[in-house]
Amino acid sequence: MNLLLKAPPEKKPPKTWPDKGEIRFVNLFLRYFPDEPPVLKNLNFTILPLEKVGIVGRTGAGKSSLISALFQLTDTEGSIIIDNLDINQLGLHDLRSKVSIIPQEPVLFSGTMRKNLDPFDEYGDDLLWKALEEVELKEAVSDLVSGLNSKMSEGGTNFSVGQRQLVCLARAIIRNNKILVLDEATANVDPQTDALIQHTIRKKFANCTVLTIAHRLHTVMDSDKVLVMDAGTMVEFDHPHILLQNESGFLYGMVQQTGKAMAEVLTRVAKQSYRKLQSPEDFLEE
């Protein structure tokens, strides 16, 4: 099937879609080849508007396939419904332009910095500079000979990995979509850039639904919920503190495997996050 012809072009979502950010997986299966067994099997869960959800699981559990399904990179059976619209009914451009992703390997194209931040020339310079300022790249881009019109080399190799990731973050800030997907966006950056990215996401995407694929548990232990995948199925889905009460559970086992000291840290982070969720007024001073 030619995926580009998958939905009729006249099937347009409303301009403001999605405005809440609710995502429902309903009886969802995904297979990469028609004659092979599905890699995602009968997924049924709802991510509420504005929830921050971590997606964890061992290698091959189906974490990345979940994102492939969300972006319709391959055929799926069943439904993914975003704010009451089945994404199967949408053209791919309409879907993908409305959901932002910051991948593990930052994607930059050859062309100008402006083109990388705003590929379709939809926004003014002021907004682009403001986004660069928020990810602490304004000075670095100002120092380039042509500023926003400076050429990026293929893959952005004239920028460090951390800087390339910050450009991707600035791009997401500019698009201001209601749903943001992070594929362990800080796995390959230095601790300072990691902290900056985490802080910026918390601040700039507070009113968005954020899905984080985590290869390292510490990035998601303060999430509203953690979705645990195993062999293509959902095995646990709740706040991490609640999941950690089950000593025979999947998340509990994964946390214990990090070693005694790290397990204590992760458990403490989850507990504090849960308390904050239950009594936010107690944390207003922080």
Image: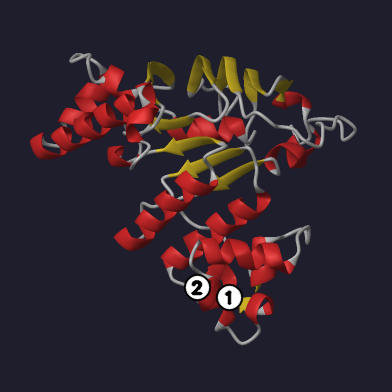
The residue pinned by badge 1 equals: 153
- The picture places residue 272, in percent across and down from the top left corner, at 27, 31
In front of the other: 136 or 281? 281
- Find out whether the residues at labels 1 and 2 contact each other: C-beta distance under 8 Å: yes
- The picture places residue 108, in percent across and down from the top left corner, at 58, 63
Residue that appears at 82% across and 32% down: 14
The residue pinned by badge 2 equals: 157
Looking at numbered disc 2 in the image, what kind of residue is underneath it?
Thr
- Mark 2: give few (<14), some (14-19) or many (20+) Cα within 10 Å: few
SS category of the residue bearing label 2: loop
Say whether residue 196 is left or right of residue 270: right
Q: Residue pushed farthest bottom?
A: 145
In front of the other: 58 or 268? 268
Looking at numbered disc 1 in the image, what kind of residue is underneath it?
Ser
SS category of the residue bearing label 1: loop
Say whether residue 231 is left or right of residue 67: left
- Mark 1: give few (<14), some (14-19) or many (20+) Cα within 10 Å: some
Q: Quadrant of residue 215?
A: top left
In front of the other: 19 or 148? 19
- The picture places residue 35, in percent across and down from the top left corner, at 57, 21
Say whether residue 258 is left or right of residue 149: left
Q: Residue pushed farthest left?
A: 260
- The picture places residue 72, in percent across and down from the top left corner, at 65, 33
Residue that appears at 71% across and 44% down: 97
Q: CA distance from mark 1 to mark 2?
A: 6 Å
In this rendering, the answer to whether 216 lies above or below 127 is above
